[in-house]
Image: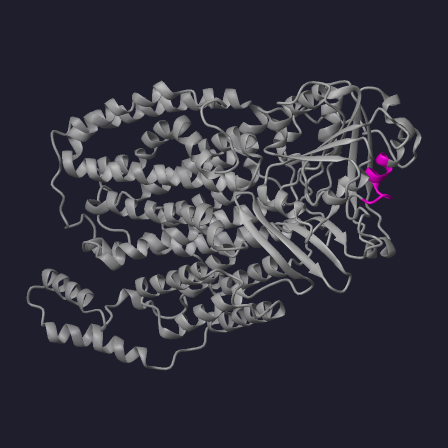
Amino acid sequence: GVQLMVAKMILPILGGSPSVWNTCMFFFQATLLLGYGYAHLATRWWGVRRHAIFHSILLFIPLAFLPIAFQKTEVGSEIAHPILSVLAWLTLGVSVPFFVVSTSAPLVQKWFAQTPHPDRDDPYFLYAASNFGSLLGVLSYPLVIEPSFSLDRQSFLWMIAYGLLVIVTIGCATFIGKLGGDREQAITLARSHEDFPETFLTPPITQQKIQWVFLSFLPSSLMLGVTTYITTDIASIPLLWAVPLAIYLLSFVLTFSRKSFQLNRTLISISPLFFSGTIALENIKILLPVGILLFAHWGSLFLASCVLHGELAKSRPHPEYLTEFYFWISLGGVLGGLFNSIVAPWIFPRLVEYPLIIGLVLLLLRDPWQEDRSSKPEIENLEALNREVKQAKIENPDLDVSEWVSANVLSHYSSRNRPRKRTLFSLTLPISLGVLIGNFFLGFQLNLGNSSFIAWLFTLGLFGAIGYAFSLYPWRWLVGFIFVILLNQFALPTSQVIYSDRNFFGVNQVLYNATENYHAFVHGTTLHGKQSLDPQRQNEPLTYFTKTGPIGQLFQSLETEPRISRIGVIGLGVGTLAAYAKPGQTWRFYEIDPAVEKIASDPQYFTFLQNAKGEVNIVLGDGRLSIAKVPNNSYDLLVMDAFSSDSIPVHLVTREAINLYLQKLSPQGLLALNITNRYLDLQPVIGALARDRNLVTLTQWDKIVSVEERQLGKTPSHWVILARDRRDFGNLANDPRWKPIANESSISVWTDNFSNLFRSLRIFKTRYSGL
């Protein structure tokens, strides 16, 4: 769970973006690759015994970097290059301890292969045990560790756990040293080779290594794609990072265990429907309960990971090549992290990589009901055939080669030309392709410039490389090519995308709806602002900010209050709130995403900022960090409207954050928070924070919107207002639409070191849409 702990430590510094987690995973996968590379090369150069002595000394170096902590002065958090900032923070703070820990799994297995233990010739079950330990750590973090311990305490406990690892590892190294030298590796096995895959007896060839890379690349990328999709709409928190990572680790545990787990044939057969259905849900945004959506996405990840990691387990080599095998697996994982965290945001204007990887998994599926032809030598692969003949001659020196070839190759070749029997898989695969094609044509817009040339080139190259590595038939290449075209041409049919931008903070789009004559700004899947193009209504605030909604009621009640002249807003959106600005007022918007500032300031898209009657300024940077720089008592009203798609960055609603806001507010100042959310109920959390500081509260959930209001651009919204004294609310104090937050003593106060979103999830409530 160190990945979850470290990501949570640095999350507040970079605005709570879901991309923080993807970048963290890329860093940890890259460090893991370095650890596996060290394990492979060191054992080859020095031998197991001498390397065990060196590694025992190396174990003490990370103690100088523990406990893990991050100082804000170490790396600047400027938003121009957030990925570099994340990687720099992680390199300085955690790279050395994690590098040494990452070497444990391959080294212990390599050492185990040198012992006289009966299972020494197939030590891969220890890889399952290692991943099982990681799985326990990942699951225990959001369910036990995060709700129970502060980050400081978590870091201290991790240091204790590392100390125990040092003791155990030195004990293993001492045992290896007493064996008196390296055991001579032998290809002959203690058990019949029938218990192992064919590749166990032969050195890995280049094509096999490329397969290992892709078989680990696809699940790694899919895990991060699922995580991005879910955390974009709910919250970038360890709870929702943990589940995809746990599923990913579980697939390793099941497929590399002694009784290697093989997916039931029926499950594999229906998986095409599962995958195509998930892509359809992702594209057309069907309104379903959160539980069903999570089941679909997590289920697809589980099926895909088990299938692909199962192929890895089948192709595992002899322990002589164990560390090299893990190196190639780790390389695939790193490439998956690199693709999702850096490459995809650069070349794709939308979150295309998630359905793209699912499509690639579909491309590699094989019918589990047909004879496994991989267990027979392919006549086209002369190199593989030559190895098979040599192995057969070793086992039987009197073998008649021509007779063996006739029995094992020619008969198999002729069987390939016999009509295949109909299976469940042969039915579900065409149906799933039909679902995908129908889904894509539902939103098909012919626009070959929708993606960059680099995106097309990269995607087709990826398909081509996988086709080569797995010797796919031409018809599968053709299906993949058609899939890429349709995927890149998909667009929501209700509105025209007139601007699209993707960066570290997510996907931003400006839509034009000709039917209702408005521009809308969508971040991820959530509406963040809308403006009518009708000159009569152009300055009218819409969506969550209408005059009849909670925030509109607040500004109307303050029109006669001269004390409200300095307003700060965390979160820009399209600048809708600037429509409430009055002459003589000073408004300052804080926005972390430069793309959002560009959209809101461009009059060809939105004009709220341009038409504002008061003085309006924009400050780029994380809202909390930027507000901390202004003098105390700088604002009469602070509005917190910082969405990350449909989630609210957790670091903006903690005890330390509330204390900061109160310092920057005047004695009679108000704090208004937009907690509108499809998946999280944050009202009890805000209530606990208010009680912690003896603040008074008012809340209104304006969820009943008439058809007429919706046609005019109003959407449901949920707002909370905090004040030091009830009289500061003015007329709203006696407004029956506003109620105090009920006291829920069971809710703990969130801090920078502690938060628990599990209790705030609306798991099985149907989400409402702002569009």
Q: Residue furthest left?
A: 398
Rendered position, 104 above or below 481:
above
Rendered position, 212 above or below 84:
below
Residue closer to the observer: 231 or 562: 562
Left/right placement of residue 352 relative to residue 181 reads: right
Q: Residue at x 49, y 30 (%)?
A: 5
Residue 121 belongs to the span the image colors magenta: no
How far across and down, in percent of the image, does residue 579 sit? Answer: 79, 42
How far across and down, in percent of the image, does residue 605 sit? Answer: 68, 53
Q: Bounds of the magenta span? A: 546-555
Rendered position, 474 above or below 555:
below
Which colouring convention does the figure follow?
one colour
Rendered position, 442 above or below 130:
below
The C terminus appears in which quarter of the rendering?
bottom right
How far across and down, in percent of the image, does residue 720 sit? Answer: 78, 33
In this view of the protein, can residue 261 be seen by the observer?
Answer: no
In this view of the protein, can residue 758 be seen by the observer?
Answer: yes
Residue closer to the observer: 296 or 438: 438
How far across and down, in percent of the image, does residue 742 sit? Answer: 81, 29
Question: Quadrant location of residue 54?
Answer: top left
Question: Quadrant location of residue 408?
Answer: bottom left
Left/right placement of residue 315 relative to residue 520 reads: left
Left/right placement of residue 65 relative to residue 660 reads: left
Residue closer to the observer: 588 or 279: 588
Q: Residue at x 63, y 45 (%)?
A: 645
Which secondary structure class fits the magenta region best? helix
Residue 549 belongs to the span the image colors magenta: yes
Left/right placement of residue 145 relative to residue 420 reads: right
Q: How many marks?
A: 0
